[in-house]
Image (cartoon, grey):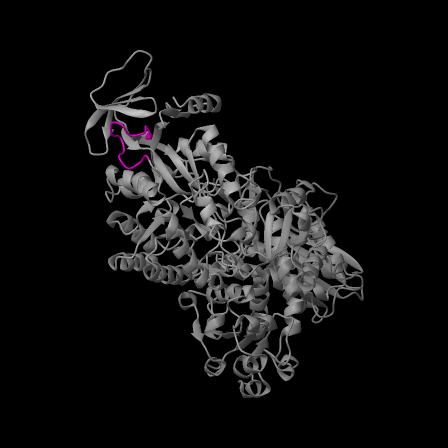
């Protein structure tokens, strides 16, 4: 029974341990010795994290294969230390039927780099008019538990109420893209002094905060679970904090880019910094960091949004919203939260693995790095440092906002269900991964 | 000064120099031969993604008076409307030998992107980008104002102490933005007037005094009142209720015009909505500089083209 | 780099008075005289010549300036030059004898530009050239009609003309 032996990794609690993996599971933690045929990884100086889980990924397949596919997106995920991604529904066709979500889930299983859990659309075609067949998606082989019209807000309050009520039957959650549409018509960047100066239509914080405020009250009224996507303002943090204090079942996510970048990046009209919700003020960044540290914000999710070059090499208002983030997420979190002393590695494991898996009802992540648990893990070298460039990316698109920044940390190895997807900092080739995933090694 | 993208980052000395060179350019209009050979052999491309006959003709006329070759590229009906990117269009034009590109674009920042994205190496002149800036308009306004204030003695001078009231849709106006920065740089005292709905975010930090009512601003006794064009469509987005109400509160009506100090000049970047933001009696009076502004536009654009294109140093004279 | 003085205040004054007399002598009887100085120092010299001529034959001459920047042949090869004002006297230049005035005659390129610039303003009966210093090294078939001082020089040397109106002192110097 050959497996993988990881020698001398630092566990998030601080202890050093060997970890042995066989048959897709963790079979030993503590002191272990290699058995014949074991692949041995020297993890001296590396931190062992549970496999990261991204609750907010755009894989673009079907329909957007020029930007990303399930294969390229999960390779990017593996390179970033992720072993599971939740794929957003805004594909073409929209993931609003069991057929589409099953297809996406199956592609993920076939390629083997990461578990792909499709997110189902809340409304047919993301149009906000009619509920999609949420039950059919939930009971499909894709086991959809997260529903979102991401990219669009479920703006109609009645539709939102019904969705919250309806998904409760399947233990589902509505992940809301909180953006009041009338307040953000033509919006291009954070509304503030800079939008006024640059002549770019403002995206006011109140357009996000008012929807979150409405939705938490609806969640309270319906006794349902609400998840708030990409919280971006200090005011939103206050609303979520207030809701949690009232016992409302709300969870919230923040993206790595909202933890690091501000609206000042728009000054050069470089559309790599154009994202929705927009980058906000430094005060918002500070509030978001503090909210992750105090638990008000539950998770970090990438909102990995690949776009081809031509969608960014144009005037700002004509460019697409979004930036890629899978490969850089852990480094940005280390830079913004760990190296600033606001978060320890155990909390990183919580916000980037355990809690997102729990919100998405993804099994296998509740007892990370313990004997008998599925072998999803990533080894990180926190002492490494990289000057970021598109060369660090492994997906199909290059729209990273971090080019030129020095970011800490590097993923050295990723193991998904016992299958190494990254070794020595490099992706394992697709055939090897697919073959290993197929045999369930 | 390699490009002219905005007035926000235009230094006072550079601004005064442009105005001074424009004085020399203006002087050529009275000569037997109105053409100067300064840009012979240079190619200026007018790249217009947005219709603007006035601005396009003004730049064309300026380039031709300097003996440059002019290529006008109107994006409508061209490959641009068929999905060619800004980058590809610009690279094509430079491959055709453009020394300078005059760009008018409906998107804020388009000129800035052309200048700084590293796609092309040509002088970029912003002829209006979205709701951001329209620097040559502000320069010609400053030139017009300086001539009215200082006459023959204008060379070398700025606008210190001049009081200018700018009225209307500041939120959507690139002319207002460019004027605020330039007038402030030149030492003028700027007053802005608009209902709150038409004031941009952060206006309180601009180098200007902000008024909500026109009468409050006119009470300061301005040297110039600049009326901005108001688009009638704005009322459909609830920026103001009706044209009648807008004209009553923010229009330069005959009564308000009559009450102005006798030497206050009236400016408008054109085209005017008579009866809405400006009454005909004001627009047609001798104190209106509307036509001067058009004439001066050519001189300013000649100066800008000359300074950016003629030397080897991008205009450091 | 040391500068060797060549002309002092009195020398400059003498040279200009001589030139003024020569110009009047050479004038074809009835022609109006228009002195056009090439900015910056040529403009000051034109003014001086005009006032000397005024003392000798009042009303016979006018003075102005002619900027040649836009007509230079090296515009695209050097740093951007800001143009200086051109002031053509009210009588214009048609049928007048125009005397172009500059401080130093060197390659002749400035004078060529001036001839072009002049054509934009009309058609003089004749154009003459007066310079304070001719230092040689012509690159064009141009010569001065009236010269304050011929100053043989090496191309590596620099000739400085300083005038009270511009520099606060009257002096011509040469340095290597």
A265 part of magenta stretch = no
Observer able to see residue C149: no
Q: Nearer the viewer, residue B86 or C23?
A: B86
The quarter of the displayed image where residue B153 is located: bottom right
Q: How many marks?
A: 0
Q: Nearer the viewer, residue B55 or A236?
A: A236
| Residue located at (44% from left, 73% from top) | B210
Position of residue A390 measured from the top left corner of the image (x, y, whole percent): 47, 35
Q: Nearer the viewer, residue A332 or A375?
A: A375
Q: Residue furthest top?
A: A36
Is A145 located above or below residue C169 in the figure? Answer: above
Q: In the visual, does B243 lie left or right of C107?
A: left
| Residue located at (35% from left, 42% from top) | A361
Q: Which residues are magenta?
A: A364-377
Position of residue A258 measured from the top left corner of the image (x, y, whole percent): 37, 49
Magenta part mainly helix, strand or loop? loop
Q: Nearer the viewer, residue A310 or B190?
A: A310
The quarter of the displayed image where residue C33 is located: bottom right
């Amino acid at each position: 029974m050959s497996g993988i032996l990881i020698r001398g990794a630092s566990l998030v609690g601080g202890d050093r341990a060997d970890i042995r993996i066989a048959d897709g599971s963790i079979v030993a933690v503590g002191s272990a010795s290699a058995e014949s045929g074991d692949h041995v990884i020297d993890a001296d100086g590396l931190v062992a994290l549970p496999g990261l889980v991204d609750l907010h990924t755009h894989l673009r397949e079907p329909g957007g294969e020029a930007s990303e596919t399930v294969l390229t997106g999960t390779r990017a995920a593996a390179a970033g230390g992720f072993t599971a991604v939740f794929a957003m529904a805004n594909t073409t066709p929209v993931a609003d039927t069991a057929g589409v979500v099953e297809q996406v889930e199956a592609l993920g299983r076939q390629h083997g780099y990461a578990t792909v859990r499709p997110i189902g659309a809340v409304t047919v075609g993301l149009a906000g008019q009619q509920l999609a067949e949420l039950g059919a998606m939930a009971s499909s082989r894709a086991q959809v538990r997260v529903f979102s019209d991401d990219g669009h807000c479920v703006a109609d309050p009645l539709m939102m109420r019904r969705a919250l009520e309806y998904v409760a039957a399947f233990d589902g959650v509505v992940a809301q893209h909180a953006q009041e549409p009338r307040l953000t018509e033509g919006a291009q960047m954070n509304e503030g002094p800079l939008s006024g100066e640059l002549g770019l239509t403002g995206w006011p914080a109140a357009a996000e905060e008012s929807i979150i405020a409405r939705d938490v009250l609806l969640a309270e009224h319906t006794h349902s679970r609400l998840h708030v996507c990409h919280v971006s303002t200090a005011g939103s943090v206050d609303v979520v904090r207030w809701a949690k204090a009232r016992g409302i079942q709300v969870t919230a996510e923040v993206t790595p880019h909202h933890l690091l970048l501000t609206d000042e990046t728009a000054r050069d009209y470089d559309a790599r910094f154009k994202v929705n919700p927009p980058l906000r003020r430094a005060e918002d960044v500070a509030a978001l960091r503090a909210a992750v540290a105090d638990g008000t914000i539950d998770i970090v999710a990438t909102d990995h949004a690949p776009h081809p070059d031509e969608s960014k090499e144009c005037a700002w208002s004509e460019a697409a919203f979004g930036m890629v983030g899978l490969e850089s997420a852990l480094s940005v979190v280390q830079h913004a939260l760990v190296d600033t002393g606001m978060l320890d590695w155990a909390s990183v494991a919580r916000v980037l693995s355990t809690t997102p898996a729990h919100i998405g009802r993804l099994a296998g992540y509740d007892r990370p790095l313990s004997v008998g648990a599925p072998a999803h893990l990533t080894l990180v070298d926190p002492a490494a440092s990289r000057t970021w460039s598109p060369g660090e990316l492994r997906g199909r698109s290059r729209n990273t906002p971090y080019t030129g920044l020095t970011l800490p940390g590097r993923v050295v190895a990723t193991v998904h269900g016992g299958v190494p997807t990254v070794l020595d900092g490099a992706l394992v080739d697709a055939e090897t991964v697919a073959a290993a995933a197929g045999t369930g090694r | 000064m390699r490009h002219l993208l905005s007035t926000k980052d235009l230094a006072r000395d550079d601004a005064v120099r442009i105005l001074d060179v424009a004085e020399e350019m203006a002087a050529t209009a009275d000569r037997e031969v109105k053409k100067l050979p300064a840009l012979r052999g240079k190619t200026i491309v007018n790249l217009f993604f947005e219709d603007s006959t006035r601005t396009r003709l003004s730049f064309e006329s300026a380039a031709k008076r300097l003996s440059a070759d002019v290529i006008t590229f109107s994006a409508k009906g061209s490959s641009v409307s068929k999905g060619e990117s800004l980058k590809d269009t610009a690279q094509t034009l430079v491959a055709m030998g453009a020394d300078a590109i005059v760009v008018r674009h409906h998107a804020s920042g388009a000129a800035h992107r052309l200048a700084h994205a590293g796609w092309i190496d040509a002088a970029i002149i912003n002829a209006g980008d979205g709701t951001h800036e329209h620097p040559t308009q502000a320069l010609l306004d400053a030139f017009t104002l300086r001539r009215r204030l200082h006459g023959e003695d204008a060379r070398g001078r700025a606008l210190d102490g001049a009081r200018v009231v700018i009225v209307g849709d500041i939120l959507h106006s690139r002319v207002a933005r460019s004027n605020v920065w330039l007038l402030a740089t030149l030492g003028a005292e700027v007053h802005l007037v608009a209902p709150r709905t038409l004031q941009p975010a952060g206006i309180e930090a601009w180098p200007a005094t902000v008024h909500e009512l026109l009468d409050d601003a006119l009470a300061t006794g301005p040297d110039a009142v600049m009326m901005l064009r108001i688009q009638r469509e704005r009322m459909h987005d609830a920026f103001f209720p009706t044209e009648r109400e807008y004209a009553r509160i923010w229009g330069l009506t005959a009564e308000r015009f009559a009450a102005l100090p006798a030497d206050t000049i009236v400016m408008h970047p054109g085209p005017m909505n008579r009866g809405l933001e400006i009454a005909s009696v004001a627009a047609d009076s001798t104190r209106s500089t509307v036509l001067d502004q058009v004439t001066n536009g050519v001189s300013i654009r000649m100066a800008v083209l000359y300074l950016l294109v003629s030397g080897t140093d991008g205009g450091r004279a | 780099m040391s500068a060797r003085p060549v002309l002092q205040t009195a020398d400059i004054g003498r040279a200009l008075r001589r030139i003024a007399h020569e110009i009047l002598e050479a004038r074809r009887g009835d022609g109006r005289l228009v002195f056009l100085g090439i900015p910056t120092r040529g403009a000051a010299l034109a003014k001086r010549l005009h006032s000397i001529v005024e003392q000798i034959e009042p009303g016979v001459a006018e003075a102005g300036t002619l900027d040649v920047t836009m007509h230079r042949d090296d515009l695209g090869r050097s740093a951007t030059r800001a143009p200086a004002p051109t002031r053509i006297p009210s009588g214009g230049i048609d049928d007048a004898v125009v005397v172009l005035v500059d401080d130093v005659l060197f390659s002749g390129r400035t004078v060529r530009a001036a001839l072009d610039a002049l054509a934009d303003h009309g058609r003089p009966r004749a154009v003459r050239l007066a310079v304070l210093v001719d230092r040689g090294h012509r690159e064009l078939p141009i010569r001065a009609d009236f010269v304050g001082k011929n100053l043989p020089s090496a191309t590596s040397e620099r000739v400085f003309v300083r005038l009270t109106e511009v520099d606060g002192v009257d002096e011509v110097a040469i340095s290597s």
